[in-house]
Image: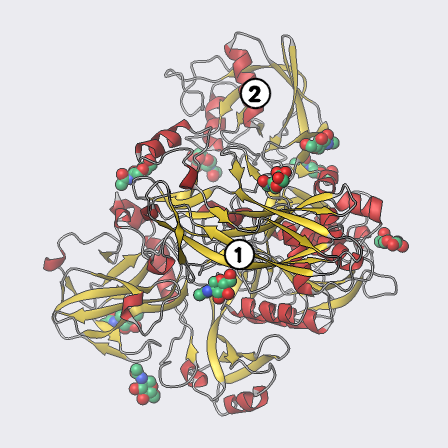
Amino acid sequence: MLGITIKSIAAIFIVTLGLGSAQDNATSGSGYVVAYPPGTHIKPGAYIVELDDITPGEHLGAVSSAFFKFPGVDVGSRYSSVFNGMAVTTKNKVNAAELARINGVKRVWPVRYHKLQYSKSAVNGSYPTLLQQTGVAQTMQELGFNGTGVKIGIVDSGVDYNHPELGSCWKTSGCPWQFGKDFIGDKYDASSPAPILDPNPTPMDCDGHGTHVSGIIAARGPLVHGVAVGATLGMYRVFSCPVDGNVYSSDDIILQGIEAAYQDGHNIISLSLGGGTWPEDPLSVACARVVEKGIVVVAAIGNDGDNGLYTAGSPAVGEGVIGVGSVDNWNITGSIATISMPYRTLSVLLSMAGSEAHPFVFETPMPIAASVDENGNDEGCNKPVTELSGKVALVRRGTCTFTQKALIAQAAGAIGVLVYNNAAGMLSPGINNTVSIPVVLISENDGLRIANGISQGKEATITAHKSAYGTFPADTGGMMSSFSSYGPTAELGVAPLVSAPGGNIWSTYPIKLGSYTTLSGTSMATPFVSGVAALLKQAHPNLRAGDIRNVLVATAQPLLDSDTGRMVHPYHSGAGLINAYNAIRSHVIFNPSVVAINGSNWNVLSNINDPHSGSAVQWIVREVKVTNTDSHRGMHVWLENSIANSLTMYMPNGSLALTPQTWPPSLHDADKLNSINSSEREEGQQNSHPQVLTPNIAEYVVAGKTSHITIYIAAPSGLRQDEHWYYGGFLNFTVTWDNDEDKGSFYIPYAGFNGNYRQIDVLAPASTGLPVIADSQMNPIDNLQMYTVTANNSALIVYSLAVPSRIVAAMLIDQNSTPLGYLPYGYIEYATRNLPSSTTPFSAAVINGTVYVDKGATQLVSIPAGKYRVQLSALRPFGNEMSSADFQTWYSPLFNIG
Ligand SMILES: *[C@@H]1O[C@H](CO)[C@@H](O)[C@H](O)[C@H]1NC(C)=O
Ligand SMILES: *[C@@H]1O[C@H](CO)[C@@H](O)[C@H](O)[C@H]1NC(C)=O
Ligand SMILES: *[C@@H]1O[C@H](CO)[C@@H](O)[C@H](O)[C@H]1NC(C)=O
Ligand SMILES: *[C@@H]1O[C@H](CO)[C@@H](O)[C@H](O)[C@H]1NC(C)=O
Ligand SMILES: *[C@@H]1O[C@H](CO)[C@@H](O)[C@H](O)[C@H]1NC(C)=O
Ligand SMILES: *[C@@H]1O[C@H](CO)[C@@H](O)[C@H](O)[C@H]1NC(C)=O
Ligand SMILES: *[C@@H]1O[C@H](CO)[C@@H](O)[C@H](O)[C@H]1NC(C)=O
Ligand SMILES: *[C@@H]1O[C@H](CO)[C@@H](O)[C@H](O)[C@H]1NC(C)=O
Ligand SMILES: *[C@@H]1O[C@H](CO)[C@@H](O)[C@H](O)[C@H]1NC(C)=O
């Protein structure tokens, strides 16, 4: 089984192993070249040179003139306001390591490409509900705020500023667009060895992403109404036109956009983009510095939610940046059909296959038949025993492709296919052009209703008029979007901070692409939060950036997970759904905005014993500052603990899960409940959740004053530590005001790892079959002792990281355990967790009889014939790279190099 899994990704490594950057001897100078993992999409010969942590701009001149001594080095953009450094390109194999050794250089980062990630929705979203559910509608109507006077800089793919809902203007008087430019142009192709930059004064959008994002902030109707239509805007275009459907930018260009937005004096910078996962990443560093300068920075957390924990991206994970997760729209609109059954008529939403060739239109009622094969299977993947001729076939999603279902129904004489979903949500059923009958997808609930009716012997017909539209509540409405990335950050920071509508969002689109469309992504949730931040800034102009963040987080509404009865974990939703009205009317600031329990500061509270085990519990103590910003009224604060689901990436049997498992388990998933019970996890146990142990539960805060509340949080001692649980919850502060009925709840999310995070296993567990030595075709080598590696018969060490690791080193050692050097691709830094459904589910280094004696991979030496092992070491969280005890280390069996 392992052989098959690994083999299937062989192609990936054969491609990505060739893509490594020029990596150099980094040990002798003060600076070093960051070694990204193989597979990182890197711009050849391009680097960001980061200078020492001094005032940005200082030493820039000296260092760049030192670079002129190297023929073949071109200094590109210089960054001096929020990032300290410059972009360089090197030709003729100039050693990036030599650049790193120049005095004043801290790190040299290979430039990565970033691809815009978002998806077109299968149905249209309806926007009024979004504004209602987030307090924006009430803010506009009751308080009259629309962002007037607040400046928002958007770094994106540009904007179609000719769109009538976006002002039809560029930098003219009264125009919302007063700032911005295009840093990339229309000719850029990231697949070419030297992509062409063609900057332009006006950032026209040729993709659509930036125009959609702009509409969420500022569209003025009639079809879309933005969150902050009065704001003054800047567009900094950093993304290319689509090339084969892909839209790219790179670190150096995005940094230019961020710097320019900062220099134009925006109050808020909105970034629906990202990549990488470490707060040390250049984009995170730049954004953290923008925050330090008092600007609100809002960034998308990422769309890798289906890969589970540790998928939060940079720059959203930067210190102080507001990382944003996505919830699905409540209402969706689209084409409808009417289903008639005796005593019952249903109006159902249709998700079209996307091809105009065979529109799903039946102007007169047509019979529906539930397709079943000879085994009673209703997925339509086998020859049906049901008579389908002249009928519309109803089949369940699953097992085979939409095209296969359609072709089978077509062969049986069906005139159309209704596929009903096997999970919540809607998607477009992709079919190819061999299908000549109309195909649509309907929701699981609608499908089950029809299937039940038919199974009770009722006759069902369908009518679908051309251009018949309707609006329906979505079954995932108000829930976290399945794509929304999870935290924590690499070293247990809480991410995202808040969530906003991002699934099925209807907004403006370039005129030549149809003027409007519905897109899904945390890209869409980000401008929503930027718009809300603008409303808050307009209402409270003196609020500092850090307090804008604190207020937005504290006034968000935690989401309930109806499957478990607990709140959604902060690593998925942050503090929950943003609410503009609550934020503006709060009159109270809680600081900090989140409590990250990162394992570096545990104590043992000796007088509290866990009733279950009898031993002392782990706890932390934190101080929360509560400021009453009301000038007249005193306020009372009560603290409660609102518990969230605990999460783990491990199954009860110790193997890795694809998606996070929750505690408590889903009430609707009997299988999961059974398997969890079998592992002796007791339900309802008091100590299976974190506790807030706080001596002073109530506090009175005088008008205009700040109180300090000391809070103790204890880990859930009843969850098994070997199961790697991440627990969390919300410090729930209820505030009441003197002489007032007014009452409000404010939340500080807290989260941490149940156990000693410094000792966590970084490598995926042995049940994955990794690490393993495999041949160049990725087949694990069974009898390694008998195996001989030669230059022409190379092997691979294949491994997978279960959590991010700052340094991973694969070295060759001899029989006496003497290290000989790093394997090719064997030394990498700022590694991310290997995501199961991504292009890099595993990582690998090459065993071919040569090693590099330096981390920077400049000096390759040949290894004499003999017996050797691989020593694979991955630095644990917060580890010190000088201490071997801080690494998790694995040794391979002996093999021969010949
Ligand atoms: C925003 O609100 C102000 C009133 O505060 C109003 O004058 C202005 O027209 C509004 N802007 C837009 C674009 O609706
Ligand atoms: C949108 O959804 C809300 C809440 O689910 C519902 O109350 C409202 O009627 C819906 N609006 C439309 C136009 O369907
Ligand atoms: C969404 O709305 C647009 C404009 O009204 C329409 O052209 C398009 O067909 C709709 N898409 C779907 C999936 O209903
Ligand atoms: C269409 O899909 C079917 C089923 O997956 C496949 O057998 C066929 O080769 C495809 N045809 C084309 C033209 O892509
Ligand atoms: C742990 O989190 C606190 C803030 O909650 C932070 O100040 C501290 O630096 C973190 N520790 C480490 C080792 O990251
Ligand atoms: C926070 O506490 C208030 C007051 O007890 C309660 O009404 C509210 O439901 C709590 N919120 C959550 C998310 O548990
Ligand atoms: C562990 O359990 C999961 C799900 O129940 C199953 O898919 C997997 O094969 C099991 N792994 C082992 C090693 O038993
Ligand atoms: C081993 O692999 C590295 C990296 O691909 C390559 O540079 C080196 O030439 C190879 N050594 C041999 C002996 O093939
Ligand atoms: C790195 O390069 C310097 C100068 O080129 C050399 O002296 C040194 O030995 C190298 N370090 C390693 C670890 O190879």
- Give the image quarter of residue 707: bottom right
- Distance (Cα) linking label 2 and label 1: 58 Å
**Rendered image: mark on residue 595:** 1
Name the residue type under label 2: Ile
User: In the image shown, does 789 or 281 lie closer to the viewer?
Assistant: 281
The quadrant in which the C terminus is found is: bottom left
Tell me residue 136's x, y (percent).
Answer: 75, 46
Task: Residue at 35% x, 29% y: name it.
Answer: 674
Give the SS element for disc 2.
loop
Task: Residue at 23% x, 73% y: name it.
Answer: 850
Pointer 2: what residue?
415
Give the quadrant of ligand 9: bottom left
**Residue 157 in view here:** no
Name the residue type under label 1: Val
Mark 1, ligand 5, within 8 Å: the answer is yes
The quadrant in which the N terminus is found is: top left
- Give the image quarter of residue 4: top left
| Mark 1 nearby-residue class (10 Å; few <14, some 14–19, many ≥20) | many
Residue 840 against residue 505 in the figure, above or below? below
| Mark 2 nearby-residue class (10 Å; few <14, some 14–19, many ≥20) | many
